Image: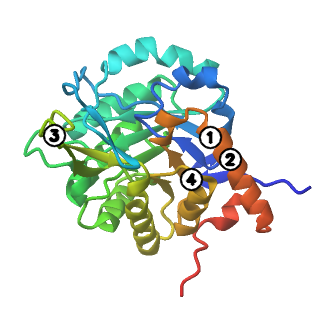
Amino acid sequence: MAELDLTTSLGPLTLRTPLVAAAGTFGAVHEFAGFGTLGFYGAAVAKSVSRDPWPGRPAPRLAAVGDGMLNGIGIQNPGIDAWVDEVAPLMPRLDVPVWGSAVGRTPDEFAHVAVRLAEAGVAAVEINLSCPNLEDERMFALDPGLSSAVMGTVRSALGAGVPVGAKLAPNTQDISAVAGACRDSGADWVVISNTQLGAAIDPSTRRPRLSIGVGGLSGPPLKPVAIRCVMEVRQSHPDLPILGCGGVTTGADVVEYLLAGASAVGLGTVHFAEPRAAKRITGELTRFCLAQGVARIADLVGAVRPW
């Protein structure tokens, strides 16, 4: 029986499979080692970390909404110094390339964290642009100029040798413009996308389901929005590598992202309900491709057929 070639390229990186564990859903990665599924991922992204410790937001900060999930965690993390001391030493033991995820409130903060992550030995750095800046509280990912400023500062600080991706937001007015600005400022690929803003209210208590009211919507309801964003960026920037992410729960979902133009596909919210999801999804992906006569995952990238 023929075997499916799962390898794919994402900018300068070659991934053994197209599946990437998304930041914020996979802890610091080592927590998932006991599930025995790390080998099904091409890479795993550790939870985002900032220069200084961030306390996060008060409970409640997670809520189920139909097939999706709202979160208002606030990127709680111990800060880069603690991360380097406590998490980085565990990475060499893991059977998966670990990427770091950097957040900040200024371009210099992003650069500081990115450099520390690279020095700690991560395989790549993801720049999470979906957080507000200090000057006017606008989200970096919503503005091409702000995104460019962050990516340019990060690339200058890191030099040319460290693979860097930019994580974008689906609620930006022109995601293709932001993606192009990130590429021109040094991003090797873009992650499309992060959560979409949403809210929910408990009818019985009359309170918002999240303490802050509005949070990030993830899970299956996000997928059509993210697929649209991937298609738009692929059409505008056909040579810009894309990691598609949002609402993936099946092998067919992975195929859909690949056809839309993504070279790799992130698994996120599915981990909360099914920590071993990557094994099942890889099996579904493999069976689908072999039934369709597809020998290489890379042959699916951008292969959507227009009407």
Mark nearest the camera among 4 and 2 is 2
Q: Which label is found at residue 264?
A: 4
**Residue found at the far bottom of this picture:** 307
Residue type pointed to by label 3:
Pro
* Residue bearing the label numbered 3: 208
Q: In which quarter of the image is the C terminus?
A: bottom right
Provide residue 157's location: percent of width, then percent of height: 35, 37
Q: Tag 4: Cα neighbours inside 10 Å, few (<14), some, or many (≥20)?
A: many
Q: How much space separates mark 4 and mark 3, taking CA atoms?
A: 35 Å
Dot 2 and dot 3 residues touching (CB under 8 Å)? no
Residue 47, image x and y in percent?
40, 30
- In space, the residues marked 1 and 2 are separated at their CA atoms by 6 Å
Element type at mark 4: strand
Q: Where is residue 171 in the image (x, y as percent from the top left)?
A: 26, 59
Q: What residue is pinned by disc 1? A: 278
> Alpha-carbon distance for marks 2 and 3?
37 Å
